[in-house]
């Protein structure tokens, strides 16, 4: 359509979503963080003294303090795990570090301790942040509600004490206190936190409302139908907690074989020490051979095979505005083989826009005049649809006359006097009922609604003069992103949304999606994800709202859109697109796959070095300096190989072929 709407580019969306008040756990309050900081600080103090040939008592004391601060906790946990007949890899790292120190390689051991202490601290921070956001979600539901008593008396009560059958009064601007059914009144209710719908929904007697949603300009009387502990918002909290607790263990590739490797290394070290000793070898010689074996067989190079590629990928993605919360996340993103996308705020801009201006023939109005009149009447209103009309007029450079006698009827629309005419704007189904008035544009209204748009009727002096179509627009890169994800996974992404079927299918057709699940509540999204995962799929969920958080937690991987994302979605997700660029999603998946390939390369290199050095030590006499040189050399090689992903060229562009 070539119209007044096309004259100037639309302004960037300004999305402000309701978010839960944040009650963050302070990072220094986490013991893992304190010990990791202490270990790192002590290591950095010891390093220059060691490398510059300082007194041994100085760097020795600092390295010893590094071992204690960074290694006591994983060592203690490892010892407790032994009670359950489990050999923890962290305990093995502590033993290897102590073995390195025992034969004079204090630097190697301290570095290993710092790596594992830092990893544990990052995991603790991620866990604490998620727990904070889950608790903060409960703040969406109001603390108090107004309960109506017999005789129309009112009392303010704790919302948690409401019972099924109680009647509550929800005044304009208040949050609904409980899940229930409207028994009296009309209003527009913003329920984006529950369903993700971009526009407030008109509510009247018989309609369902949810706790935590925001009432508009009208007063509602609501009969409570669910206990507060069983409300939709409470169930969202429960689903996020359960999904986070039962999600597959977050392990790096090498950790999947840690038990066998750990047990094998311990047994082999003991054998290397005890067998020669039993055959008459000198204790010192046997111990030196065993310690050399432990050094060359220690998994330092294996650890660095995994971490540098993944951490380099994390850093590269961070420079491009994508925050992957850990190396584990970066590895898992490359494993996905199915993508589920939210609609509002993810594939779309999340802000309603005027898409159609249809003046009625014979009224003397063109598109510009109709839009000007409608915007003038809507200007005093704070309704999202009114803001969309006013923004469209401003974007088109139209001058709005003043409006007088403005009134707003919840669920119906607005009335104002513009240039001496009475102008009414609102829902076609509620604003007018006269057959003669609606016949000329019944087809247009049906056409707009079928296309997923919200139809807004404009009346002048009681006569229909035109219809406006309003919709949330897809992001400019949505179609290209869907195509790229389809190529990466071998199947078209699925659209998961709480919005209505017409709007969902209209958007899906625009961006190239064929599988649509619409009208979903949060638990429905989780059920869909769990069903796919049960079929063996590794699902990536992309969303932005509170209603997406349970699915983000339940999925193999979750990515939140950062600009409009709720606190809970941002904390629950494994990664956040900070700059709100949808095209970054296929890019980070490709980057993750590249990092995984480098991990496999590095593991092959590290394994070759370890096998060669161990064989030499077992069948010959491997000089300790040569063993250390080979061990450190393999560590340097795999480290440098992984750092290649820090290059700017390593970030895949949307136009590149999938790996």
Image (cartoon, rainbow, N blue to C red):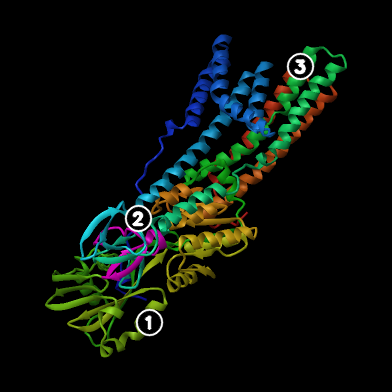
Q: Quadrant of the C terminus?
A: bottom right
Q: Secondary structure at mark 1?
A: helix
Seen at 54% across and 11% down, the residue is 58
Q: In the image as oriented, which residue stretches furthest toward the right?
A: 279
Seen at 66% across and 24% down, the residue is 95
Disc 1/disc 2 C-alpha distance (Å): 30 Å
Looking at the rendering, the stretch of residues picked out in magenta corresponds to 170-197
Q: Earlier in the sequence, mark 1 or mark 2?
A: 2
Q: Nearer the viewer, residue 635 or 439?
A: 439
Q: Secondary structure at mark 3?
A: helix
Residue 633: percent from the left, percent from the top? Answer: 68, 28
Tell me the mark number nearer the camera, choosing from 3 and 1.
3
- From the viewer's perspective, is 411 left or right of 597? left
Residue 473: percent from the left, percent from the top? Answer: 39, 66
Q: Verify whether residue 261 appears in magenta.
A: no
Disc 3/disc 2 C-alpha distance (Å): 64 Å
Residue 159: percent from the left, percent from the top? Answer: 32, 54
Q: Residues within 10 Å of mark 1 (few under 14, many from 20)?
A: few
Residue for badge 1:
446
């Amino acid at each position: 359509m070539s119209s007044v709407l096309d004259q100037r580019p639309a302004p960037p969306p300004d999305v402000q979503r309701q978010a839960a008040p944040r009650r963050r756990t302070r990072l220094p309050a986490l013991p893992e963080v304190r010990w990791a900081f202490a270990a790192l600080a002590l290591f950095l103090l010891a390093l220059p003294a060691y490398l510059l040939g300082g007194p041994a008592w100085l760097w020795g004391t600092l390295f010893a303090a590094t071992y204690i601060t960074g290694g006591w906790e994983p060592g203690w946990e490892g010892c407790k795990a032994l009670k359950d007949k489990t050999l923890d890899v962290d305990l093995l790292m502590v033993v290897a570090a102590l073995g390195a120190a025992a034969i004079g390689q204090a630097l190697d051991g301290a570095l290993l301790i710092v790596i594992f202490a830092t990893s544990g601290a990052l995991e603790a921070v991620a866990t604490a942040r998620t727990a904070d956001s889950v608790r903060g979600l409960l703040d969406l539901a109001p603390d108090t509600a107004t309960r109506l008593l017999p005789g129309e008396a009112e009392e303010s009560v704790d919302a948690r004490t409401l019972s099924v059958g109680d009647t509550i009064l929800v005044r304009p601007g208040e949050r609904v206190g409980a899940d229930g059914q409207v028994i009296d009144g009309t209003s527009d209710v913003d329920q984006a936190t529950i369903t993700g719908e971009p526009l407030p929904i008109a509510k009247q007697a018989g309609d369902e409302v949810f706790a935590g949603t925001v009432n508009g300009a009208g007063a509602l009387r609501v009969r409570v139908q669910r206990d507060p502990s069983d409300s939709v918002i409470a169930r969202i909290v429960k689903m996020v907690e359960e999904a986070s607790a039962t999600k597959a263990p977050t392990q790096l590739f090498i950790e999947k074989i840690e038990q066998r490797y750990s047990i094998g290394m311990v047994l082999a070290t003991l054998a290397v020490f005890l067998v020669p000793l039993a055959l008459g070898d000198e204790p010192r010689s046997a111990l030196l051979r065993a310690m050399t074996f432990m050094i060359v067989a220690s998994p330092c190079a294996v650890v660095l095979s995994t971490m540098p590629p993944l951490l380099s990928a994390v850093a590269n993605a961070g420079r491009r505005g994508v925050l992957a919360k850990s190396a584990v996340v970066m590895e898992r993103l490359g494993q996905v083989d199915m993508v589920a996308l939210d609609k509002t705020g993810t594939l779309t801009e999340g802000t309603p826009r005027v898409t159609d201006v249809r003046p009625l023939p014979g009224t003397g109005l063109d598109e510009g005049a109709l839009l000007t009149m409608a915007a003038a009447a809507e200007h005093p209103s704070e309704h999202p649809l009114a803001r969309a009309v006013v923004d469209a007029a401003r974007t088109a450079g139209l001058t709005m006359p003043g409006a007088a006698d403005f009134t707003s009827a919840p669920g119906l629309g607005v009335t104002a006097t513009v240039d001496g005419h009475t102008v009414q704007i609102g829902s076609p189904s509620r604003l007018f009922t006269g057959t003669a008035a609606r016949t000329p544009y019944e087809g247009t209204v049906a056409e707009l609604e079928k296309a997923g748009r919200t139809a807004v009727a404009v009346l002048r002096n009681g006569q229909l003069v035109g219809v406006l179509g309003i919709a949330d627009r897809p992001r400019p890169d949505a179609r290209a992103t869907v195509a790229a994800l389809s190529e990466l996974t071998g199947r078209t992404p699925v659209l998961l949304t709480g919005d209505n079927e017409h709007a969902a299918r209209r958007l899906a057709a625009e961006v190239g999606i064929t599988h649509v699940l619409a009208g979903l509540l949060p638990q429905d999204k989780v059920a869909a994800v769990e069903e796919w995962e049960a079929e063996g799929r590794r699902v990536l969920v992309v969303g932005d709202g509170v209603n997406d958080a349970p699915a983000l937690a339940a999925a193999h991987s979750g990515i939140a859109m950062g600009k409009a994302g709720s606190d809970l979605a941002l904390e629950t997700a494994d990664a956040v697109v900070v700059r709100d660029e949808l095209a970054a999603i296929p890019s980070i998946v490709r980057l993750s796959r590249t990092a995984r390939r480098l991990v496999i390369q590095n593991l092959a290199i590290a394994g070759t070095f370890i096998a060669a050095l161990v064989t030499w030590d077992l069948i010959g006499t491997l000089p300790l300096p040569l063993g250390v040189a080979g061990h450190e050399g393999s560590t340097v090689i795999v480290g440098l190989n992984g750092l290649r992903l820090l290059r700017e060229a390593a970030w895949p562009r949307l136009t590149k072929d999938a790996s």
